[in-house]
Amino acid sequence: MMQLSSVYYRTNREQQAIRNAGKWCQMAAVLVLLLCNLSRTALADDSQRTKAIVTEVCAACHNLDGNSIDPTFPKLAGRNPDYLVRELKVFISGQRKSDLMGPIVATLNTDDLRPLAEYFSAQKPTSGQIKDVKAAEIGRKLFQNGDESRDIPACAGCHNIDASGNSRFPRLAGQHREYLIAQLNNFKNDVRNYSSARLMRELTKRMSDEEIAAVADYLNGL
Amino acid sequence: MPLNRGNIVKWMFKTLLILLLWPLTLLAQDQSSTNVSSAGQKGWNELNGEKLEALKLNGDATRGEESFQVCQGCHKRGATGSASGAYPRLAGQHVSVLIEQIADIRSGKRKNDKMLPFADEHELTTQAIADIAAYLHALPLTPNVFGKGPGNALARGKTLYLRDCLICHGENGEGSAEKFYPLIAGQNYKYMLREVGFIRDGKRGNANPEMIKVIKPYSDADLAAVTDYISELEIH
């Protein structure tokens, strides 16, 4: 079993490392949640409980402040809490498939999803570095205007002009280039095949690989 | 026929009968013509399914603005449509027309594969359709800045418009909310030209059969002329 989003970019060794990290997170998650549940009364308040889950379960990949270091893991800082809860739920239901996230989210309590989403949403998002200035300019045009000749809508229509997102569509500004490319390809190749992702599946099929990379470069720099 | 008393009585009786029945035949004719047109209306614009459901709902313009996010990637903020005419202007359109067109595209009656994923049930609920229609209808009718025709066939276009189009679409292209006739004033020339071509050639699945009949004899030049004229119409 291999995480599908990683097909394009990871060597076997990296994949092994990620799988190990995933297992470690999973074990940690079970342990922490067990402890949290046992000592529920002992914890002063829910924010401490949330912080504990963040520290032990999420931070290894997404970082404490939600700005992940590894570009294959998404930044969560500043993303809309409604959106984050929705995605956590599609991970839990198995609609959004991930060998990594699947076992981890399975350990989460439904009651914890909202506070976790609120925590990451409240973190300050960071910007990335544009890798290819020329490509980023092509990406900017496509993101802001789309391409009418091929019925590619402006991404800004849903994700906002500044890519800050909203409750229905995620923030993309500053997101890792690698992660964006992987996810756009997951849409294009029908890996993210749940019904609510139909729109993205359709429109990524209208985009070339170069355009996907260009949009990712632009967004990373925001 | 000899002119005797019996024949005169027969003639008078026939005349009386005709005079009595004449209004009835007129009435019958009237009814049959009403039936034809309402049958056309029925086939064209049957109010059922999601269309009827959405029409019954109270649209909320504030919610509609949010739901319109998924549309504005193509139709632009403020629903001005695009300069190329690939996507129509929607601002100011009648609620009934907007609901009908979205519902028809969703049901496949008006075929639009490119738009379908954006009007998917996971993106738009029936309530969201009503909300979007309310939002778009309330948008201001700004002048048609980038959607005018070449302006070289306005006289011919006017003649055709006054003869064939005015009766439904109105003097200023205002259409009719009640009859589901679209507002066409301020619409993009290239968009309209594409669509009237589709309507004439039977490619727009939900076109009004009455309109197909009217523009069937139109040449491409006629369509361009009348569209040129329409693109100059303004509602103040």
Image (cartoon, coloured by chain):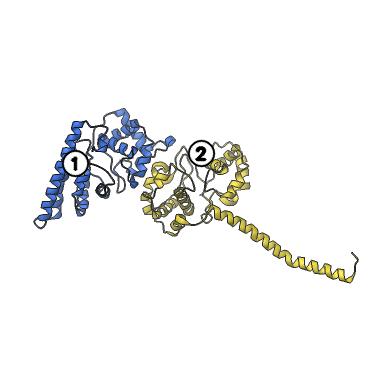
| Residue A194 appears left or right of B111 | left
Please say whether residue B210 is visible from this viewpoint. yes
Q: Percent x, y for residue B153? A: 59, 37
Tell us which disc is closer to us: 1 or 2: 1
Badge 1: residue crowd in 10 Å (few <14, some 14–19, many ≥20):
many
Which residue occupies the foreground of this view, A188 or A150? Answer: A188
| Residue B143 appears left or right of A45 | right
Alpha carbons under labels 1 and 2: distance apart = 49 Å
What colour is chain A? Answer: blue
Question: Residue at (83%, 69%) from the top-left corner?
Answer: B10
Question: Residue at (16%, 38%) from the top-left corner?
Answer: A20
Indicate the amino acid at tag 1. Answer: His
Question: Residue at (84%, 71%) from the top-left corner?
Answer: B9
Q: Percent x, y for residue A215? A: 32, 34
Residue A62 bears which disc, if any?
A: 1
Q: Examine the rendered structure and indicate whether residue B179 appears above or below residue A218.
A: below
As drawn, which residue projects farthest toward the front?
A1
Indicate the amino acid at tag 2. Answer: Lys
| Residue A19 appears left or right of A143 | left
Q: Which residue is mark 2?
A: B190
Q: Are marks 1 and 2 on the same chain?
A: no
Provide the secondary structure element on which disc 2 rests: helix
What colour is chain B? Answer: yellow
The chain holding disc 2 is B
Q: Percent x, y for residue A111? A: 20, 55
The quarter of the image holding the N terminus of chain B is bottom right
Q: Percent x, y for residue B127? A: 39, 55
